[in-house]
Amino acid sequence: MNILVTGGAGYIGSHTCISLQMAGHSVIVVDNLCNSKVDTLNKVRQITDKEITFYQMDVTDETAMEKIFSNHHIDGVIHFAGLKAVGESVLEPSKYYYNNIVSTIILAKVCLKYNVWRFVFSSSATVYGDNEAPFNENMPLLPTTNPYGETKAMSERILTDIVKANPAFSVSLLRYFNPVGAHESGLIGEAPNGIPNNLMPYVTQVAKGKIEKLKVLGNDYSTVDGTGVRDYIHVMDLAEGHVAALDNLTEGIHIYNLGTGQGTSVLELVKAFEQANDIVVPYEIGGRRPGDIASCYANTSKAKRELGWTAKRNIIDMCRDAWRFEKNYKE
Ligand code: NAD
Ligand code: WQD
């Protein structure tokens, strides 16, 4: 199939381009490069030895999107393009609501106009709010603590209503847990701008000596060791989950958790990183981060049952691959 990948130069999108090409699909990327570099796509080409068509355009620009859809026969869309920094979304809510909601609406509208019936959307486990883990797809969406999370919940609702009005539209809402790691080649990975917000890139930068030590954000949660528990998933497993979602897409709206089902605490992750890479990660205990919950992990049985997909890589693989990328990465 010819797949349009929005946000394909970004972290998850670029890894998914690899899995799509390895599965025999052709890839067209649209990205405005607001949080990525075009060179990442050259690295993808190097890994797969296949061509990628690239448009540097904004998904909120309807005329630009129409141009792409009229230039190519597109069989399906994977919509990664979005802003994702939780803290920034609190400071600049309208920027987040505009970018993340308008891009979703325009893309769905253009898909329907050009008879493109397959649509896969990047959602997030954040839509479960403070439901009790393990999270399953039947749980109600609860309010999230930030505008970023709300854009995901709203996009899910908008796409659900669009499917109700257009029953032939086939939409998969993929709720990612905590994507980490990098492609095994070490050529592409997660390279956030500035000080990382998320745990794994923070740990890799401490290991590299760019940051002095990790601050563990709370050790008084009711978890195995008091630190926050999350469901870390290797980005290549996540990428392969997208191919499975696309290949198994049928009419209507479908929701899948993409996680491992395994919870790992902050201190367990630090220990795994040290063990995988034979390197010490200095840390200190700090206070809780506002909005954090104690535990977030997936019930993964629906994706296994309906998509035949499960994550294969473990926490040691995630730590090893994240470090291999960071070690060699030059800004
Ligand atoms: P990323 O920032 O690396 O990738 C997003 C890409 O979208 C970037 O290349 C950016 O330049 C592009 N982009 C943003 N707005 C655009 C627009 N209007 N037009 C064109 N391009 C645009 O982020 P990521 O980690 O790869 O996340 C991909 C998607 O997955 C996002 O929608 C994110 O919200 C979602 N998600 C990410 C995580 C995570 O922890 N990384 C978890 C759950 C969901
Ligand atoms: C993981 C754990 C922290 C940093 C976020 C978004 C979510 C989704 C994934 C997009 C928590 C602890 C962290 C640090 C720490 N993104 N931590 N020291 O918060 O689960 O999810 O990314 O959809 O929406 O909210 O991920 O990596 O920030 O935190 O101790 O310096 O690590 O408290 O327990 P989170 P995270």
Image: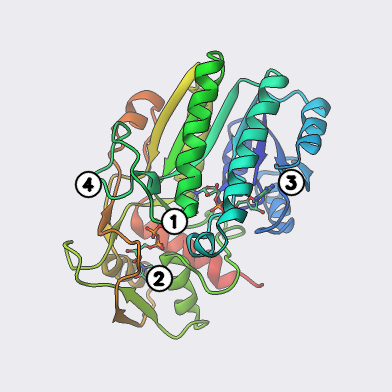
Q: Quick check: 133 above or below 212? A: above
Residue 240 seen anywhere in this rendered image of the structure: no
Observer-nearest of 203 and 285: 285
Q: Which residue is mark 3?
A: 58
Q: CA distance from mark 3 to mark 1?
A: 24 Å
Q: Are marks 2 and 3 in contact (CB under 8 Å)?
A: no
Name of the residue lying farthest toward the bottom: 212
Which mark is on residue 277?
2
Q: CA distance from mark 1 to mark 4?
A: 19 Å
Q: Amino acid at mark 4?
A: Glu
Q: Sequence-wise, which precedes: disc 2 or disc 4? A: 4
Lateral position of residue 277 relative to residue 33, left or right = left
Residue 64 seen anywhere in this rendered image of the structure: yes
Q: Sequence-wise, which precedes: disc 2 or disc 3? A: 3
Query: Which residue is drawn at the image coordinates 63% and 36% (left, top)?
Result: 21
Tell me where residue 308 appears, x and y as whole percent: 38, 27
Which mark is on residue 11?
none
Which mark is on residue 132?
4
* Secondary structure of the residue carrying numbered label 4: loop
The C terminus sits in image quarter: bottom right
Callout in the foreground (1, 2):
1
* Secondary structure of the residue carrying numbered label 1: loop
Other-residue count near label 4 (Cα within 10 Å), few / some / many at <14 / 14–19 / ≥20: some
Ligand 1 is within 8 Å of the C-beta of the residue at disc 3: yes
Ligand 2 is within 8 Å of the C-beta of the residue at disc 2: no
